[in-house]
Structure formats: structure tokens, C-alpha cells
Amino acid sequence: MNFNLIYDKLMEEYSPQGWWPIISYDGSNPTKTGAIKGYHPKDYTFPRNKSEQFEIIIGSILTQNTSWPFVESALINLSKLDSFTEFSPKFILDLASGDEELFKEAIRPAGYFNQKFNYLQNIANFYIELNGKTPSREELLSIKGVGNETADSIRLYAYGEKEIIVDAYSKRIFSYLGYINEKDSYIKVKNLIESNFEGNVEDYQEFHALIVEHAKRYYTKRPYGLNDRILYEFKI
């Protein structure tokens, strides 16, 4: 199995995706799904500052069990609050202690707002304790509210560390191709892909984004991959 050939095929089909979208950035969406703006195809300088870095981190929390447009709405709601100056742990903690209901109402579009209210405070306190250090995967996983997918998203997009993200879409695609069993563990699939994919961090970022874009077209309804003629040649 050659994940690089799959990557090349998806890149040829969809072009660079410019993830992670930043709501304050007036970048165009290269495809028809996801956020309206905030993408930055071929510009890998993001995050450009601490505010954008922390925006990616809280976005990784908010996107749990929901789709990106709802996360975007929650982030926009937060950015419109009178107390907002930038995305920072101080902003999150001050808002949480000052007006819990306002906070929860702002993030309501992302769902599970009571849980995520607590998780965002956890990650804010953790970010402060890091004091600028890049967190290890193990450190992130020790935080309540951060699982494998969230930890890898934070490491890959907020800190530019090479991590393969195994989401439901990845499992559906590679199960269809015969590379994995859809019930395989997160770590088993992650290790398989990382052992058979060569690339820099930008390639890792694009691979995940391309998988998501492709899956939205062919893997949202069962039977998954039924009309997927783009990756059919890689089926084993």
C-alpha cells in the first residue's frame, strides 16, 4: 500500500486546501464544503501568532462531534463579544468566570456546550502552563476533554508537528480500500499510515484536509465509497 500515491491523486483532484481555517483571515475556500472563508491554500505560515495558534486549539475542542461550519459560528460568536480582544487563554478564563451563560450561548452552535465549556477552560489553563513550549502528545492526552484526534489536530495544525489524524472519514476510506478494518483502533491506523507515508508537515496537513474533502463527497452515506472512482484504483 502506498499512501503517497493516494495523496498525489487527491491533491491532483482537489488542489491544496489551506487548512486550518482562521476566521479573521479573508482567505477563500478552495472547495464547496466547510467554512466560507479563512483558508490559506499554499501559505503554510499559519498560525502567524499566538492568537491564531490558540484559535486553532480551541477550534480543535469545539469541532468534537460536529462539523466545521458550526464551529466557525461559535468562534465568530466569541469574537463578537464586548470582552474580546484576541483568542487567548485569558479571554477564555475571564469569560468563563465572568459570565458562564454568555460563554455557553456563544459556543452553543458547536453542540455539547456544557462539556465544551469545561474543556475550553481545561485547555486554557494547560496552554498557560506550557509557557510557550510545544506540548507532547502524552501531555495533551492527559487533559480532560482531549482525545487522540484532538491531540493530533492540535499538534499538527497549531504547532506544526507531524501527526496523522485518524478521523471517521479516514477509517471509512481506508476500510473501503481494504487497508484496515473500520473497527481498528485509532493508534493502529495512525501507525499504519505514518509508517507508509513520506512527507513533511505541510504534506501531513494537506493529506488530512484532502481526506476530509474527498470523504464528504463519497463517504457520508452507506455503502461508503460506492461511487468513488477516484481512489478505486488503489483498492486491494
Image (cartoon, grey):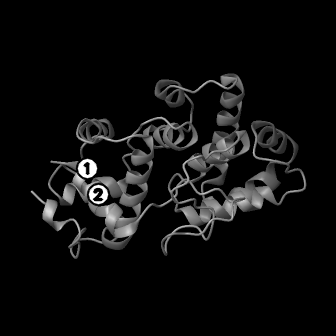
Direction front: furthest residue: 42
Q: Which residue is mark 2?
A: 8
Residue at x-position 50% and y-position 25%: 136
Residue 193 in the image: state x and y as whole percent. 27, 42
Q: Amino acid at mark 1?
A: Asn
Direction left: furthest residue: 236
Q: Amino acid at mark 2?
A: Asp
Which residue is more in the foreground, 33 or 78? 33
Label 1: how many Cα within 10 Å (few below 14, some 14–19, many 20+): some
Q: Secondary structure at mark 2?
A: helix
Residue 132 in the image: state x and y as whole percent. 67, 26
Which residue is more in the foreground, 177 or 209? 209
Which residue is more in the foreground, 138 or 105? 138
Q: CA distance from mark 1 to mark 2?
A: 6 Å
Residue at x-position 47% and y-position 25%: 138
Q: Secondary structure at mark 1?
A: helix
With 235 as the anchor, is 60 left or right in this view? right
Quadrant in the picture for residue 212: bottom left
Q: Which residue is mark 1?
A: 4
